[in-house]
Image (spheres, grey):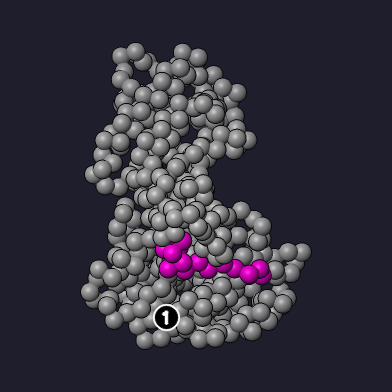
Amino acid sequence: MALEYSEVMAAGAMFYSSAELNKASESTEALGEWITDAAKKVASNVEFGSSRSEFLAFMEPTPAAFKEAVVGISAALAIKGWLKSDHGQGADPVAQKVFLTGNVWPDEVEKFRIKAYGFDDYNSSDFIVRTGDKKYFGVSLKKKPKKNSADPTLINKAFDTVLNGSEFNKIKEEITELRTEYFAGLVRQAHEDGILFIKDINRQTDKELFEAKKRDKKIFDRAYVNIKGSLSGGYDNDRAPDAMRKFVNVDLAKTNNILFKRLTQYMNDNADLFAKTLINLVLKVKLYDELSANKKLKDFSFGFALVTGIGEISKGKPSVSKGKAIDLHTILCGLSDLEANKKPYKIDVDFEKKAEANAAKIFFKLSKAGVNILDMELRYKGSFTSQPQFFATITKDFQTILTEKCLVPNPDGYS
């Protein structure tokens, strides 16, 4: 997993006042001085689960560090505002200590780590801020360069890992059969079209053509459906005019692609189950319940927020925009408004967006009572023998519910 250096910059920024952070972002010279000073604070006051030396080595005044520092400062200012308004941590809260998580969590915060719902880390905090005795606040950090840039995705998860639980067993079996049949069909068609040549293809099952575990590895270095090139252009030549990978991508990009159509049908047939599962995975709505179930944590305070740092180096100068922090309690309140309306959840495909993208992906919206909650994307990333991946962001409508007003009609006739 690649290191996300904006996390260590945000962690370091939590040891400064808002005035100091604003001053640090006035010029590249000021920013460089701040990075040098912040590196010392990080070395003394941040605990790392792993990669301490790599993070510290990055904290030097270089162009790459400037880029991450402005995001980190934006995020820290948003976190400070969140800690003040939602958790009463003072007018300008400063961290006592910060803990960077990852594959390994520091010992002091390991107790807040949760394995649930198909996640090894259901508590998706990228770092945890301690502001006082037994007061801890987890931050899931995302970033973008400008306020009007597309929001970063909150989830990147394989389709079958979303289907976590015995209630999904039958669906998972059917989807496995569907994927096997679909991709085996493309392999057979590619053989017929001369893109591939597979000896004794008619004697092979769909499962073997899809998984290709018994293929001649001297000829095919990967599963048939993942071959980059073609028979005529070379199987490793992805620039071949009739390349297999291009052939597969073209079929998946069709607006009426049967695989995506059937996957969407499964979601719609089980819309309520899928919706609640996806909302839980993306927005971590059961996090506080999971923490409360641990009696060892009853004397601890733990808050959680989805935070977006917004910043860039523009025309050689730091540009720090106002970041966003959405408290989990706020998310729960917004979902409570949605649950009060008894209309079912819906999952609608955005065919217009798919047609514009012309790629091996499909776009859809998860909504209730006419209010879109999540913008989602299902696409293949890398291997076609792997499950397609879910990507999701909170919609503008749902953000409005969280920050301004309720858009969902009340069942009693008022909003």
Q: Is residue 353 above or below residue 371?
A: above
Q: Could you say which is closer to the camera, residue 52 or residue 351?
A: 351
Image quadrant assignment for residue 403? bottom right
* Magenta stretch holds residue 324: yes
Q: Looking at the image, which residue is at 30% across and 20% down? A: 205
Q: Residue 165: give x, y in percent of width and height.
A: 26, 47
Q: Is residue 25 above or below residue 356?
A: below
Q: Is residue 31 above or below residue 92?
A: above
> Badge 1 is on which residue?
130
Residue segment shown in magenta: 320-335
Q: Is residue 239 visible?
A: yes
Left or right for 341, reference 405: left
Q: Looking at the image, which residue is at 38% across and 60% down? A: 285
Q: Is residue 126 visible?
A: no
Q: Residue 1: give x, y in percent of width and height.
A: 44, 56
Left or right for 211, reference 322: left
Image quadrant assignment for residue 328? bottom left
Q: Amino acid at mark 1?
A: Arg
* Magenta stretch holds residue 81: no
Q: How many C-alpha atoms fall within 10 Å of the one at disc 1: few (<14), some, or many (≥20)? A: some
Q: Is residue 64 above or below residue 24?
A: above
Q: Could you say which is closer to the camera, residue 393 or residue 188?
A: 393
Residue at far front of view = 413
Left or right for 107, reference 320: left
